[in-house]
Image (cartoon, rainbow, N blue to C red):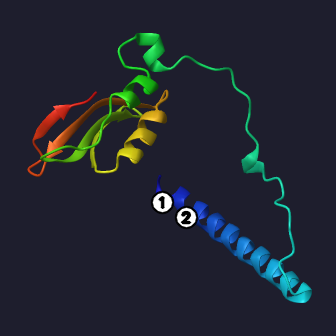
Amino acid sequence: MPADQQIPINTLLLTREELFVRVYALEQAAAAILGEPYPFTRPALPSDIRLKRKPTPRLSERSGAFQPPSAARESLRRIEGLETAYRVTYRRFGQVVTEDHNDLDALRTLLASQGAHLTVTRVETIDLGGRTQAVLI
């Protein structure tokens, strides 16, 4: 994001944070008056509203080139023997990204979040030297 856009966004985020701090202070003041926390209900926020969209077929369903996410999650396993991490390669907004992860749950979350702009293309286990030990996806 260009700096001329980032600066006003950061200003708005700081203002938002200041308002959250103010709300917290008011809630604490109410609790001090009552001697116990008041059960405030969370107001509906505009960011909570979800627009209903027509479901679109996933890339895996349209092209048949990739495994469905559920099948991909099932092919994962814990690191064994000399393996030290997972190396995952994915395409995000047209760019190929390769990352090393050691948390299987985080990898499963990444696989579950695949969609139009994020597609996992390869998952492999690597050893301490970064050499491929097994290709999982």
Asked if 63 appears above or below 22 in the picture, the reply is: above
Question: Which residue is depicted at the point 75% across and 76% down?
Answer: 24
- Label number found at residue 42: none
| Residue 7, picture quadrant | bottom right
Give the residue type at disc 2. Ile
Q: Crowding at label 1, few (<14), some or many (≥20) Cα neighbours within 10 Å?
A: few
Q: Which residue is mark 2?
A: 7
User: Relative to 136, is 26 on the left or the right?
Assistant: right
Q: Are marks 1 and 2 in contact (CB under 8 Å)?
A: yes
* Residue type at numbered disc 1: Ala
When the figure is inspected, residue 6 is found, relative to residue 62, above or below; the finding is below
Picture coordinates of residue 71, whole percent (x, y): 40, 23
- Residue at image mark 1: 3
> In the image, 90: left or right of 85?
right
Q: Find the distance from the CA under tag 1 to the CA under tag 2.
A: 6 Å
Task: Judge by depth and name the residue closer to the eye, 126 or 2.
Answer: 126
Q: Secondary structure at mark 2?
A: helix
Secondary structure under badge 1? Answer: helix
